[in-house]
Image: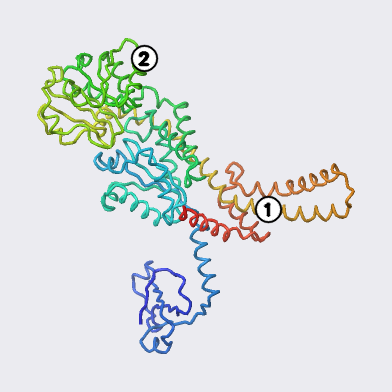
Amino acid sequence: MAATRCGTFAAPKTGDLVVSVGPSPSSSSHSSRNRVGFRRRTECVVVRCEVGLDNLRSNGVAGVQRFDFSPGSALEQLKINAADRYTKERSSILVIGLSVHTAPVEMREKLAIPEAEWPEAIRELCSLNHIEEAAVLSTCNRTEIYVLALSQHRGIKEVTEWMSKKSGLPVSEISKHRFLLQDKDATEHLFEVSSGLDSLVLGEGQILAQVKQVVKVGQGVVGFGRNISGLFKHAITVGKRVRTETSIASGAVSVSSAAVELAVMKIPEPSNFAAARVLVVGAGKMGKLVIKHMVAKGCKKMVVVNRTEDKVAAIHEELKGVEITYKPLDQLVASAGEADIVFTCTASETLLFLKQQVDEFPAASHIVDNTRLFIDISLPRNVDPSVRDSRGAKVYNVDDLKEVVDANKEDRIRKAMEARAIIMDESRQFEEWRDSLETVPTIKKLRAYAERIRMVELEKCLSKLGDDVPKKTKRAVEDLSRGIVNKLLHGPTEHLRCDSEKGRTLSVTLENMHAVDRIFGLGTELSLLEEKIKAKVEQSKR
């Protein structure tokens, strides 16, 4: 005889016998553990029905009961369990991520997802069994996966396994460094990210542009749904509001400016920075910002290596009076051998500088104490970590920027407090918006129900009026019927929307929703379940 143990009820197969195994009737005494609040565990055993009740009782199994699980009743139980799981308990917004605060750069670069791969990543995530919607935010400081999950624990497990498969890192290693946030905490976290509060450099503006890019890339992608897209759009609003209403952006620095500051700090005589031979690898957004900050520090001469010349020419045109020399990618190694300071800020997924190459470079100038500085702010990194073992070379990456940031720690805390109140207020507003989504299917069904009645009664009225009724009269009667329905539905519809200012919390609104469901027989919960299952089936077909 085979028996299956289960901690909670699971719908048995048709023809199975469900046996509840609890304490025997004779064991009426309770242990002290039970008296102080430990609940006695009840086990559920599913046994094939060939086993007789008498045999079970004779073997000392107490509390045996027979249940009738015909195909209909088993199906109903399955529906009830599924509806409880997927509709009564609202889907959760989760964020599973690793950032500069939780994981080293060596791990973050393996988990980094290039922007061009975000749409495919969303599709892959939404093909997982318990994920409805998804978004990817991947920068040099973080890789964060935002999802709407049918089940919190299963969703976390599936996304973590997906990250493991994508990066080649074991689940156990990712779990050591990941952070997990749900619903309100996940919302506030993204709002902090977009506001620059979670950045290595407080208030830096580039992260808001990256959040905007998530929305831009996600448009039209199946899986970047209403909840997650709404969250990111609201995060953009929050980021703008925080920067407008607080002083968080005043004197704020970016990763690029912090990189330049770090280079200045590492030179024996900072005043000699302008005379150093500088190479910038990459002329994208980060590279352009590095060049601008170097100019602000007095550096008026530099070499820029880029795949194409057009971006370098545009920067040169913008920065009058600065000598910018363009070099193609095939002159990268030679150009680095002639530089004192090398900034790398590209999207390359392969290493640009290897230890054996750097070992052959001539010594740098006395300005940097004959020690060439590599400031690598790319992710994945462009400089092989083993270069730091080369004689005459030092390597710094984005994690080393903390040295620059920590110098203004007290100011960071004060500015963060200014923004916190705004984030809390905006988080409440977003939760109210999301709560209101719970009742949208009920509102739609209520309106559809009323519309069916209106159309039937309208047809009856028009048929009684005869065929020679003028079009103007028909239109007037139809407008009248529609106006009556809209006015009758206005009150119920308002009470199906959350509004804390009017005392309509989520619990009150859901009570109203269930009341409307019962009164009009709308059957919203099972239809919601059917819609969610249908959506998952459609996603699996794509």
Which residue, given by chain and number where applicable, does mark 2 sit on? 317
Q: Where does the image place residue 289, in percent across and percent down from the top left?
A: 33, 23
Along the line of sight, the residue nearer the viewer: 136 or 244: 136
Please name whichever residue, 207 or 361, is drawn nearer the observer in this view of the structure.
361
Colour scheme of this structure image? rainbow
In the depicted structure, whether residue 424 falls above or below residue 477: above
Q: Residue at x 37, y 81 (%)?
A: 27
Name which residue lies at 56% across and 51% down.
438
For disc 1, the neighbor class at 10 Å (few under 14, some 14 to 19, many from 20) is few
Q: Position of residue 284 (x, y in %)?
A: 34, 26
Residue 62 screen position, x and y as percent? 40, 83
Determine which quarter of the picture holds residue 43: bottom left
Determine whether 481 is above or below 337 in the image.
Answer: below
Is disc 2 placed on a helix, strand or loop?
Answer: helix
Nearer-the-camera pick, 140 or 187:
140
Which amino acid type is shown beneath numbered disc 2? Answer: Glu
| Dot placed on the residue nearer the N-terminal end, 2 or 1 | 2
- Disc 2 from disc 1: Cα separation: 61 Å
- Do tag 2 and tag 1 residues touch (Cβ < 8 Å)? no
The residue tagged 1 is 448
Label 1 SS = helix
Residue located 45% across and 48% down the image: 93
Direction from residue 251 to residue 493 in the image, left or right: right
| Amino acid type at image mark 1 | Ala
Up-down: is 139 above or below 94? above
Could you tell me which residue is drawn at 9 percent across and 29 percent down? 391
- x then y, percent, for residue 345: 29, 29
Marker disc for residue 179: none
* For discs 2 and 1, the disc positioned in front in the rendered view: 2
